[in-house]
Image (spheres, rainbow, N blue to C red):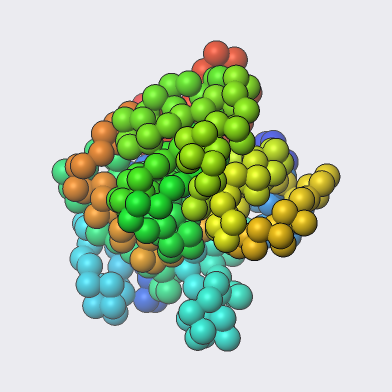
Amino acid sequence: MAKAAVLTAERRLEMRDIPTPDAPPAGGALLAMEGCGMCGSDVEQYEGEVVKMGMMTFPCIPGHEPVGRLAAMDREAGRRWGLKEGDRVAVHGVAPCGACHACREGRSCMDAFYYGFRSLGVGSGLWGGFAETMEIAPRTRLYPISERLSIEDALLFNPLAAGFDWVLRLAEVKLDESVLVLGAGQRGLASVIAAKEAGASKIIVTGLRRDAFKLEIARKLGATDTLIVEDVDVREDVRRITGGLGVDKVIETTPLAFSPIADAIATARPGGLIVLAGLKANKPMPEFPIDQVIQRRLRIVGALSTSDWSVGQAIRTIESGRYPLELLHTHRLPLEKVEHAVHLLAGEVPDDTPLHISILPGLSA
């Protein structure tokens, strides 16, 4: 049996004992979970938004940022992955089919397998990271991760991969370009690291008053300027910082809020590029300044999930030790506290502002 946090309905998580398979699946593996990170998608899933989008059904085991050890796998899986039982690995949260038209063209898979969003009624049901054991499907990408890393640092592979994807692969930030990062959450800070790695000359980060400690971390990671949105006019300050030119690239990471999108469009230089990565719970934007986009020839790109390339870049950066990543860790909680962790991340716990939360099955409740 494996303990698991099971999402049974909207805003309802319960602990269950789930039978574990006697042997690994053909071509796959069983993973002994060491830990799993959390992000805003976990909050949306808990609140029922993912079900409304048709991306999952209840019940399921959430958790899509897992790190663990290969407890069992068949010979073919070991040969294909180049791994052995006992190896410590990070798991890519999306397993593409490799056969659909989109996969063949190098685009997002049309029939991908999403860890943390698969029904408990499919196979073993152990498809999420908020559990003691997780089943690994054959088409999954696994990444060896150094034994010397703390589990908290190792679990940053997913948010940091998002930063590399959004800043380098999608925004194509180049040496000496200016970057505006809207939002100082874990993926906003990951974008700061990626922009620093790209050699950006100016890295401007915005946040709320309650995010003051996150903005301080942003500066330590490489941000050149930080702005508290309640205290300044973001558009005027960006114009001042860039000498009236506007920024070359904008990375918008804020969940739910629409004003940052308008700020992104207003602050991007003519011909600039905007990456939109902050989900808005399927709600329409009340007003969209389409004329500004057209007249200033702006490019807008949507971002979701992470690529194989970006996960590799993220793990190499974490293992390099070049950045004080320990500053990002605010909470480490046992499996039994997953629901509390979701409330923390949703901002529902007074006087406690989280940044990166690690769920650790081996931690005592």
**In this rendering, is residue 111 above or below 240?**
below
Please report the residue visible at 25 percent of the width from the left and 59 percent of the height from the top.
144
Q: Quadrant of residue 230?
A: top right
Relative to 73, 116 lies left or right: right
Please report the residue visible at 38 percent of the width from the left and 36 percent of the height from the top.
223
Residue 212 seen in the figure: yes
Relative to 303, 24 lies left or right: left
Of residues 286 and 39, which is closer to you in this image?
A: 286
**In this rendering, is residue 160 above or below 111?**
above
Please report the residue visible at 59 percent of the width from the left and 74 percent of the height from the top.
111
Task: Point out residue 107 in the picture as x, y percentages from the top left corner.
Answer: 53, 76
Please report the residue visible at 61 percent of the width from the left and 62 percent of the height from the top.
299
Of residues 10 and 148, which is closer to you in this image?
A: 148
Task: Point out residue 236 in the picture as x, y percentages from the top left corner.
Answer: 60, 32
Numbered disc total: 0
Q: Residue furthest left?
A: 148
Q: Residue furthest right?
A: 286
Task: Point out residue 50 in the picture as x, y percentages from the top left corner.
Answer: 69, 51
Q: Quadrant of residue 217?
A: top left
Of residues 205 and 157, which is closer to you in this image?
A: 205
Q: Residue furthest front?
A: 243
Task: Point out residue 104 in the picture as x, y percentages from the top left corner.
Answer: 50, 86
Residue 129 seen in the figure: no
Q: If the image is split into quadrants, where does the C terminus sit?
A: top left
